[in-house]
Image: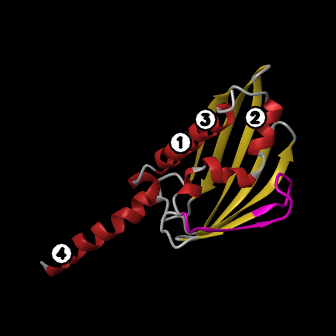
Amino acid sequence: MLKKILIIIGAILALPFLIAAFVKKDFGVERSVVIDKPVAEVFDYVSKVRNQANYAVWSQIDPDMVPTYTGEDGTVGFEYSWTSEHPNVGNGSQTITQVIAGERIDHALHFMSPFESTADSWMETQAIGADQTEVTWGFTTRVAYPMNLMLAMMDMEGVIAKDYDAGLSNLQAIMNSDE
């Protein structure tokens, strides 16, 4: 009888690890918004990482967050680092890895706490009219086994999508505010 109980307990404990072996490890989010400004003006604003403090929801969670900037904003190699005691902000850095003028800016993200991970993000701008620009904000990452089980248990893509939608809405309001 004890042997059966131990086997059942062992099976229950092993089940999440077995499930995690079949859960996807890669995920990403891509959201877009239309801004009533020419593409050059919009790209100039979104290519500056410092401007994210005005629209990205994560930048607004902790007013005591300590930012550090290294290099020339809007150019390859510019790095923004942050430290925060807030559990939803933590510590990390964002480095510009590529700039295609007027079109796209790529970033490497390195989160150090509350958990260590890396991700890629980007912002693209595309003219959809003389005075209208579509901005697309994207994010991709790989979550290692067995932590990838979080993707199945929590709607991580939905959480990030919600934050990107809110950030893009803030960006739209900022860019369209001086009309």
- Type of amino acid at the residue the image marks with label 4: Ile
- Labels 4 & 2 near each other (Cβ < 8 A): no
User: Residue 125: which numbered mark, if any?
Assistant: 2
Q: Is residue 99 or residue 40 the one in the foreground?
A: 40
| Circle 4 residue | 5
Which contiguous range is marked in magenta? 63-79
User: Residue 166: which numbered mark, if any?
Assistant: 1
**132 to the left or right of 171:** right
Q: CA distance from mark 4 to mark 2?
A: 59 Å
Give residue 126's position: percent from left, percent from top.
76, 29
Q: Nearer the viewer, mark 3 or mark 4?
A: 3
**Would you call the spot at circle 2 few (<14 residues within 10 Å), some (14-19), or many (20 or more)?**
many
Q: Nearer the viewer, mark 4 or mark 1?
A: 1
Magenta-span inclusion, residue 72: yes
Secondary structure type for disc 2: strand
Q: Earlier in the sequence, mark 3 or mark 4?
A: 4
